[in-house]
């Protein structure tokens, strides 16, 4: 499965996410992305993909200016701020759209932002993604300030450059089209941050609320490493948060911030093929020497009915030189208690051994093939560079019985 992993060990901001994802594109798609961004129609906004270096690592900074001005380094939603250095032809200016600005901020309600986004020349999916991210921010601001969502007026996170950041990330996600998106736990920073409402603790209240349910941590780095926009984008797109999965990396992108720390101030994105991981699997095993084959067969049927993934037997030698049978039952952790109850109910064992392992699987799909015998199901499996397919046995057996053919003859005619 094509998997995107986001390393947020130095937090997350909209511009850093956009820059890291931008680096995953090939050169042709980079030009397409910047052209689309230039045609959004945001008044006076200019987008540049600039090369920059942090701690010896070369990456990209997505620099967004409005009327030539860039978000100040202390503003709440761009605490990482912006690096220097241009990337030649990747400097495109967006055409006039006509908005009233206070400085270069657009103070907008969620309804105003929706009106602007609906006019963007992007797919409907990208429009819905942008608005969904802004709704996450609006709901958090509403809860923090105790006012209805309709009364929320965005300041830092509602500025033109933030709209460009959110739009850029949503557009890049569509262009990359990963089948799975996961991220590391999020480093939020420490200390205090100055925003439109005064001095607040890090993470700011709205950011902290957005990150509810997501693993986060602080540290010795002073400052706001995760912004409201970055938090909302992670919450919307990432399916899970944890260690980097097994992945065969195809491209690695670095989205750079401006401030310099002992640790490289960047967000890293990795995309590539990863095996389908079915989470952890529990293998419950036990030995018996006083059950008939019929009773063992009946117990195995009950285990499958209870949600077992697999059940199998192994002949073993037991104490007092008795031949016996080892039964192994594989199940998910969620099913384990129920399976244990079935084991003790339907077998004579007095104890069960547990082994918990990670499970890797090929992704599987089932399709129907039209044949002279009617529809036949085909099971396809993919992953690890492998593709397999086979006909559903039950369908082949049914046709063979009905037509008086062998299964080999049925397969040949199909």
Image: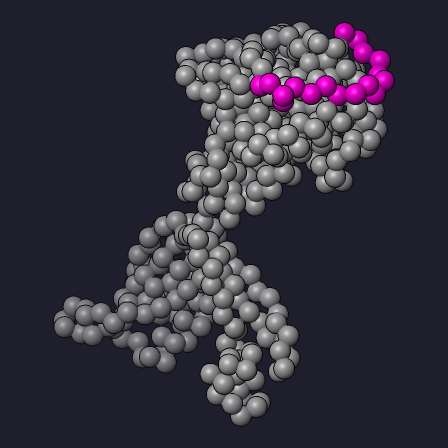
Q: Nearer the viewer, residue 313 or 340?
A: 313
Residue 74 in which image quadrant = top right
Specify the farthest residue to the front.
Answer: 89
Q: Nearer the viewer, residue 88 or 291?
A: 88
Residue numbers of the magenta segment:
87-103
Q: Nearer the viewer, residue 385 or 291?
A: 385
Does 366 appear in magenta?
no
Vertical position of residue 376 compared to residue 266: above or below: below
Residue depicted at x 64% and y 30%: 31
Return the x and y of residue 356 as percentages of the image width and height. 36, 50
Q: Find residue 290 and report its horizontal and vertical position in percent.
A: 27, 75
Q: Is residue 34 left or right of residue 381?
A: right
| Residue 141 appearing in the image | no
Q: Is residue 90 magenta?
A: yes
Give the main secondary structure of the magenta stretch. Answer: loop
Residue 110 point in image, percent of width and height: 79, 26
Q: Quadrant of residue 87?
A: top right
Q: Please tell me which residue is depicted at 47% across the width and 39% down the height of the picture.
A: 250
């Amino acid at each position: 499965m094509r998997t995107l992993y986001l390393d947020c060990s130095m937090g997350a901001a909209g511009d850093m996410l956009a820059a890291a994802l931008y680096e995953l594109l090939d050169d042709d798609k980079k030009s397409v992305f910047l052209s689309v961004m230039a045609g959004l129609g945001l008044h006076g906004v200019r987008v540049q993909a600039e090369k920059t270096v942090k701690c010896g690592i070369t990456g990209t900074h997505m620099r967004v200016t409005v009327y030539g001005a860039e978000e100040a380094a202390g503003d709440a939603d761009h605490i990482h701020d912006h690096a220097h250095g241009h990337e030649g032809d990747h400097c495109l200016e967006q055409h006039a759209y006509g908005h009233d600005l206070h400085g270069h901020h657009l103070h907008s309600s969620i309804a105003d932002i929706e009106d602007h986004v609906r006019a963007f020349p992007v797919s409907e999916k990208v429009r819905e993604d942008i608005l969904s991210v802004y709704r996450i921010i609006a709901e958090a601001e509403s809860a923090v300030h105790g006012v209805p969502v309709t009364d929320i007026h965005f300041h830092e996170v509602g500025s033109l450059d933030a709209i460009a950041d959110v739009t850029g990330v949503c557009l890049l996600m569509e262009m990359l089209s990963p089948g799975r998106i996961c991220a590391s736990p999020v480093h939020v920073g420490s200390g205090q941050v100055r925003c439109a409402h005064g001095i607040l603790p890090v993470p700011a209240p709205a950011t902290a609320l957005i990150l509810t349910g997501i693993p986060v941590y602080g540290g010795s780095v002073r400052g706001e490493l995760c912004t409201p926009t970055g938090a909302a984008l992670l919450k919307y797109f990432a399916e899970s948060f944890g260690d980097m999965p097994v992945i065969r990396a195809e491209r690695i992108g670095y989205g750079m911030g401006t401030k310099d720390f002992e640790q490289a101030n960047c967000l890293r994105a990795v995309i590539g093929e990863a095996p389908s991981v079915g989470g952890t699997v529990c293998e419950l095993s036990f030995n018996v020497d006083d059950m008939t084959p019929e009773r063992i067969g009946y117990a195995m049927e009950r285990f499958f009915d209870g949600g077992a993934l697999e059940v199998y037997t192994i002949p073993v030698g037991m104490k007092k030189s008795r031949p016996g049978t080892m039964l192994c039952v594989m199940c998910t952790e969620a099913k384990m208690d129920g399976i244990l109850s079935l084991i003790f109910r339907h077998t004579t064992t007095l104890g069960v051994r547990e082994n918990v392992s990670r499970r890797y699987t090929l992704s599987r799909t089932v399709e129907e093939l039209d044949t002279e015998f009617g529809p036949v199901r085909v099971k396809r499996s993919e992953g690890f560079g492998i593709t397999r397919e086979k006909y559903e046995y039950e369908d082949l057996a049914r046709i063979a019985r009905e037509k008086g053919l062998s299964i080999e003859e049925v397969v040949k005619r199909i």
